Image: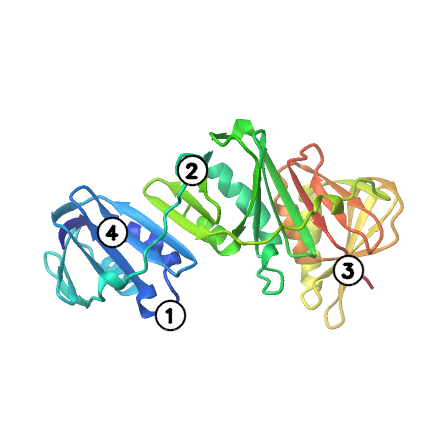
Amino acid sequence: MKLIILRNNLKEGLVAIKGSAGSKSSNLPILKNVLITTTKSKILLSATDLEIGSTYQISGKVIQEGKASVLLDSLLDIVANLTSPKLNLESKSDSLIIKSDNYQARLISSDPDEFPIIPEISNKDRFIEINTDVLKKMLLEITPAISYSEIRPEISGMLFNFSLNNLTIAGTDSFRLAEKCVYSRSFNTNFEHSFRVIIPLKLIKELLRVLPPGQQAQILFDSNQVMFKFLNQQIISRLIEGEFPEYKTKIPKKFNTEIVVSKSELLEALKLASIFAQQNQQIKLKLGQNYLKVSSASASLGENYYLVPAKVSGKLGEIIFNLNYFLDGLKCIEEKKVFLGLNQEDQPALIKGLEDNSFIYILMPIKY
């Protein structure tokens, strides 16, 4: 293998696939590598940890076809610290030679044939196409409600529930649940049937790292895999097996207490409450005639409260929430006015924009 490539192009590609490579503690050393493959028409960089596989195509001049496999971090460190605009890469037996005008390095290479094969999607004709800005916003709103669970792997990912008219994604860690829906005007598709799949949280986090702004992404599925394609990159992962919980019945439809407040004022109250809630991460909510009282206390620091002007209906004694969980949901709301629907301390609460039903956040109170 022999090629000439722009340093910035190589750096960009290595950074893009870095999150898919194996960690330093990986039992298989070759998973820490990048596979460089060249043909007459393209240069491909590949990385995988056997859960996620990522491929990035870069432009350059291929002098001799071939492939090489070297430590990704080491190659990236070299490329990132060079200033020469062009680099020459050449594989020789068990080495990859990197040259610039005034620099040369030799990286020991592994057998490229031992690099794991990154799978392909069997169904390449059906896809969902969506703007990366829309997709990233959706993922950011749902990700906080998901956490890894070895006991219940089906909630260690994000539900993609597709119908011809809308795409709904959801996530839960059993203490809270977030759901976001976009309608068909926000995406294009040639799927002719509905489906539900669970996408691993690890893949979601990697997408949030690499999704480029203002581009189009294609999402492809087969029976057990999902692939995201955008610009020069594609990322593939196995789907999570199992059934995502039927959460719709858990979403409250009626409330003992309904509150409408300014998002900005409620955020200010919560930020101040966080000073006194550093130890237990708890906030208390209590209703007044035309305000919501947000309070927190610390045995070592003291206590505080903030009266947030509110439009209220119903009655509320005192209810306690996890501060961080509450903030996670509130921050995702874009409207200036927020609706809070509350019931008893053993029943879920609902947080959403006053007029926007496309995003809802369900949170269990803390019993005391």
Q: Secondary structure at mark 2?
A: strand
Sooner in the amino-acid sequence: mark 1 or mark 2: 1
Sooner in the amino-acid sequence: mark 1 or mark 4: 4
**What residue sits right under mark 4 in the picture?**
10
Q: Secondary structure at mark 4?
A: helix
Q: Is residue 268 visible?
A: yes
Left or right for 151, reference 289: left
Position of residue 48 relative to residue 61, above or below, is below
- Residue 130: x and y in percent read 47, 34
Q: Are marks 1 and 2 in contact (CB under 8 Å)?
A: no
**What residue sits right under mark 1 in the picture?**
24
Kindly identify the amino acid type of the residue bearing the numbered disc 3.
Ile
Q: Are marks 3 and 1 in contact (CB under 8 Å)?
A: no
**What residue sits right under mark 3 in the picture?**
366
Distance Cα–Cα, label 2 vs label 3: 41 Å
Tell us which disc is closer to us: 1 or 2: 2
Q: Secondary structure at mark 1?
A: loop
